[in-house]
Image: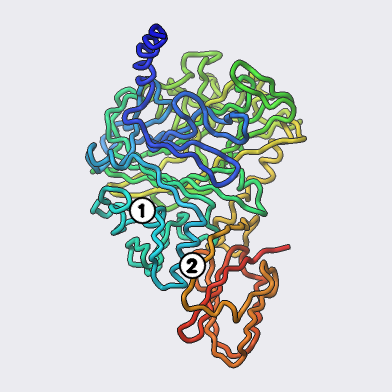
Amino acid sequence: MKKTLLLLTMFLPCLLLAQPDPLPDTAFTNGNGIRALINANGALFHDFQKGQFLTDETGRSLIRAAGVWIGGLDKGGGLKVSAQLYNEDGRQDFVPGMANLSKEENLHWNKVWRVRAEDAKYHWLYYLVHQAVKDTLPSIFGWPGKGNRFFKQFNGFDLPNDDMPLAPFKDRNLNGIYEPEKGDSPMFAYEDCNSPVFPNEILWYTFHDNIEHTESAGSIPLMMTVQNQVSTFKCIDNKVASEAVVLHYRLINNALEDIDSCYFGIFTDFQIGCPDDDYIGSIPAASIVYAYNADDFDEDCGAFKGYGEHPSALALKLIWGPYNEFHKELPLSTLMVLPENPPHTSGQGMPTLDYEFYHYLSGRWKDGTRMTTGGDGYNPLSTDYTTIAYPGLPTADTTNWTEPNAGNLPGRRKVIASFGPFSLQPGAINQLLLAFTYFPNESKDNIKIVDEINFYLHHTFDFIYSGCDEVVFPGCETNIEIPPLTSPLTIAGRFEIRPNPASDELRLLFRDEKAVLSVEIHDFLGRKVFENHQASDVLILDVSNWPVGAYTAIVRQGKERSVQPFIVMRP
């Protein structure tokens, strides 16, 4: 026993060296079928030992690790790069917090905040019933929304007193201050639109690169704060969105100078069951990157459990952004493969120096050689330049540039998918929305599952734009259960809603036909979509053109009131 303890004691420093400093707070997503590990320092799906993007009870992860890469130039042409890999031996370019705060202040921000849809819905309905909020849910009142006067009470430290944005929230009175006591609540944030669909769960955290860079070999920090809102949806009518983790990144330039020729990249180390027989591909027109098994059978290998017949697949989808200085949305600009053991040249392989990271972000190989079409993309003698690898679908058409057509040997696939270039002035903010989506496979071969990605993923997340565009396909109908509300002044026994759910026609039935009743209907985000004063025993509404989702009817008669939720859905 003494020898065992001695060996463990000797080995403990080695384990500690493998961890980032400070050790980041962690949280698993728990809003749909994906359990994905989130680290407060920006590292995704990785516990610094193995992958944690879990889709079933086997412990099998489809990703070993993922993270953010950012690179750009200052006005003098100096290179600045920050990159997230595996935090091996404590190497890191990012830590929790904000670039404009001190190291001591940032120790408080080593945290991942979480809010559930049930909490947000309950909070809003409680406010509608009581016109005030006394039932203080910690996830709502402790949310790091700008100006939240309850924040210190629930978190033990103060919010920063500056103009930098914090966690997104629904601002009921549009005063720019998060006031949960007045009905404000966390919300799913994206540009210029208000989605009627609230995710089943939202996680939020912030990290920055204002430290000594040990991952990118001492490169100069960008002074960049990165905020990430991680959302999971559970849609009744959209299975693909329910197998996804959605990431909303916000980039804030805290430097005193411009960052030009800037690229934002997502590094992903795929492992589809056994990672020794994987391929990758892309659909540039839809900003999609995907990984799939190289054949129809995924065997076990070493510590990895394969899928056997009908192997699954995984895709990374850019939903929108970022924007360049002309406010033009940028599509996927670069997809590069980072081979651990380059087959032909030392010009390929994993980067270690700042300019090597930037080369990959901007569509060049490790040695600066431009990527070319065909083969594995490395051919210094070719001038057929490209920046996106393997843009063809692996079909019977042998002219497509795919991994099978190129004759590549299957194996582990590490990629960097980047978006740019764009510029950020001091204090400027840019943002983008993307999703990792899992495609289970029960009956298809390895090529048919790629066809499914191409068929479904183009429009899977269109429901997010439903606050901007009238045409929404597909939707995201949810069924969010909340605890019952109590109301001291109620007329609940004197009216009812039929049918619930409703698809075409909704009836509000009243027992007192002579009473003047005020009726308001709000969508999930609290927006008023209907208002009426009437004195009849039935009110009939045509809801055939209403977006599917959860609504709330508020009925008042004098000082008495009642709130009843209902659903609009399509057969």
**Looking at the rendering, in which quadrant would you find the C terminus?**
bottom right
Q: Does residue 281 appear anywhere in the picture?
A: no
User: Can you say whether 3 is above or below 104 in the image?
Assistant: above
Which residue occupies the foreground of this view, 215 or 253? Answer: 215
At horizontal 23% and vertical 43% (from top left) the residue drawn is: 256
Residue 366: x and y in percent read: 44, 22
Which residue occupies the foreground of this view, 130 or 545? Answer: 130
Q: Which mark is residue 235?
A: none
**Looking at the rendering, in which quadrant would you find the N terminus?**
top left
Q: Earlier in the sequence, mark 1 or mark 2?
A: 2
- Crowdedness near tag 1: few (<14), some (14–19) or many (≥20) residues, C-alpha within 10 Å: many
Q: Which residue is mark 2?
A: 125
Q: Does residue 220 appear anywhere in the picture?
A: yes
Residue 185: x and y in percent read: 42, 60
| Circle 1: element type | loop
Q: Which residue is mark 1?
A: 142
At horizontal 27% and vertical 40% (from top left) the residue drawn is: 106
Q: What amino acid is at disc 2?
A: Leu
Residue 450 in which image quadrant:
top right
